[in-house]
Image: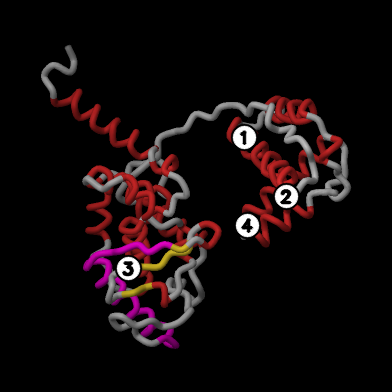
């Protein structure tokens, strides 16, 4: 039976990303190795709940974190759910195995004054790399996009007339995110410099598109990579923030926290972030509540009594 059918299912029918498919395949291969079975010949009907429990214990004993163990268990659970649905097995042996609990840290975000310093920094230079870097940071902050979503943008995903960007998230799920006047002007400036530098694209007027050309280009005119974007954010935000983490994802957290702190409905934030469920978005309510509690203890005369 093997794992090939399941891997093909998540790759072709569920359209999981290449990275996710690779992770699932590696997790399942590791399990097969643990039970001394070739992944292409493994018969899930011959595996027991005890095998799964022993695998879990062995990973913890080897020093794997609870988060890693839960992820690997999730891969195995997903495969058994698939096999159960298509009638290849009669029992989901993973159902009786409890994975270790994982403490969920609150999301890290940049403070408002740090974002203000970053905004001031954006006005220092007007060469192509500086303008591009500033736009990338501002777009992450204003839209809450993921790193892969930002570098995956093409010119025709930007609509300057409607002031909105079309974003393709996980599993190519599409969503529309609005932006404001300031970002619109930054985009126009970037496009002007980009086309002066590299040519080959029509200037994007309001309400028009320029095709499938990658929107963000590196210094050589090639599509900006996720690694390059990470380096840009780490360098730029590291100059204005005292946070230990300076990643594109921190800007995504900053977007969500700022929206919630300024009165946005949590369901709206969920849709803008492209979360599949509200549970993923609710972590930001804990962050803002901690902020409120800290402010209360600092300001209210009875708080410390």
Residue 295 position, x and y percent, is: 20, 30
The kind of secondary structure element at disc 2 is helix
N-terminal-most mark, 3 or 4:
4
- Residue 164's label in the rendered image is 3
Q: Is any atom of residue 258 visible in this view?
A: no
Q: Which of marks 2 and 4 is in front?
A: 4
Pick the front one: 97 or 187: 97
- Eyeballing the image, is 11 above or below 103? below
- Residue corresponding to mark 1: 70
Residue at the image position 41 percent from the left and 83 percent from the top: 210
Label 4 – label 1 distance at C-alpha? 21 Å
Question: Which quarter shows the C terminus?
Answer: top left
Label 1 – label 3 distance at C-alpha? 37 Å
What crowding class fits label 1: few (fewer than 14 Cα within 10 Å), some (14-19), or many (20 or more)?
A: some
Magenta residues, start to end: 175-201
Pick the front one: 187 or 242: 187
N-terminal-most mark, 2 or 1:
2
Report which quarter residue 80 is drawn in.
top right
Label 2 – label 3 distance at C-alpha? 37 Å
Q: Is any atom of residue 202 visible in this view?
A: yes
Q: How many labels does the image show?
A: 4
Q: Magenta span has 185?
A: yes
Determine the main secondary structure of the stretch shown in magenta. helix
The kind of secondary structure element at disc 1 is helix
- Residue corresponding to mark 2: 25
Residue 64 position, x and y percent, is: 65, 32
The kind of secondary structure element at disc 3 is strand
- Residue corresponding to mark 4: 14
What crowding class fits label 2: few (fewer than 14 Cα within 10 Å), some (14-19), or many (20 or more)?
A: some
Q: Nearer the viewer, mark 4 or mark 1?
A: 4
Pick the front one: 242 or 251: 251
Residue at the image position 85 percent from the left and 49 percent from the top: 1
């Amino acid at each position: 039976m093997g794992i090939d059918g399941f891997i093909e299912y998540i790759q072709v029918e569920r359209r999981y990303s290449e990275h996710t498919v690779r992770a699932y395949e590696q997790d399942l291969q590791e399990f097969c190795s643990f039970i001394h079975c070739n992944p292409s010949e493994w018969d899930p009907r011959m595996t027991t709940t005890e095998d799964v429990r022993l695998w879990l214990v062995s990973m913890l004993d080897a020093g794997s974190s609870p988060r890693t163990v839960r992820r690997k268990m999730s891969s195995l659970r997903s495969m058994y759910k698939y096999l159960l649905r298509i009638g290849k097995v009669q029992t989901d042996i993973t159902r009786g195995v409890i994975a270790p609990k994982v403490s969920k840290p609150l999301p890290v975000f940049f403070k408002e004054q740090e974002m203000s310093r970053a905004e001031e920094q954006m006005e220092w230079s007007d060469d192509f790399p500086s303008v591009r870097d500033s736009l990338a940071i501002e777009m992450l902050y204003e839209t809450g996009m993921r790193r892969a979503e930002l570098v995956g943008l093409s010119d025709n995903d930007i609509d300057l007339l409607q002031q909105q960007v079309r974003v393709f998230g996980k599993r190519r799920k599409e969503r529309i995110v609005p932006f404001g006047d300031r970002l619109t002007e930054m985009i126009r400036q970037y496009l002007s410099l980009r086309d002066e530098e590299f040519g080959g694209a029509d200037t994007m007027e309001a309400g028009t598109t320029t095709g499938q050309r990658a929107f963000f280009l590196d210094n050589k005119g090639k599509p900006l990579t996720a690694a390059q974007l990470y380096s840009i954010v780490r360098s730029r935000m590291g100059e204005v923030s005292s946070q230990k983490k300076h990643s594109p994802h921190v800007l995504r957290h900053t977007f969500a926290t700022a929206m919630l702190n300024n009165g946005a409905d949590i369901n709206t934030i969920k849709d803008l972030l492209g979360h599949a469920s509200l549970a993923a978005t609710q972590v930001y309510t804990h962050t803002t509540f901690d902020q409120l509690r800290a402010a209360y203890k600092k300001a209210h005369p009875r708080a410390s009594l």
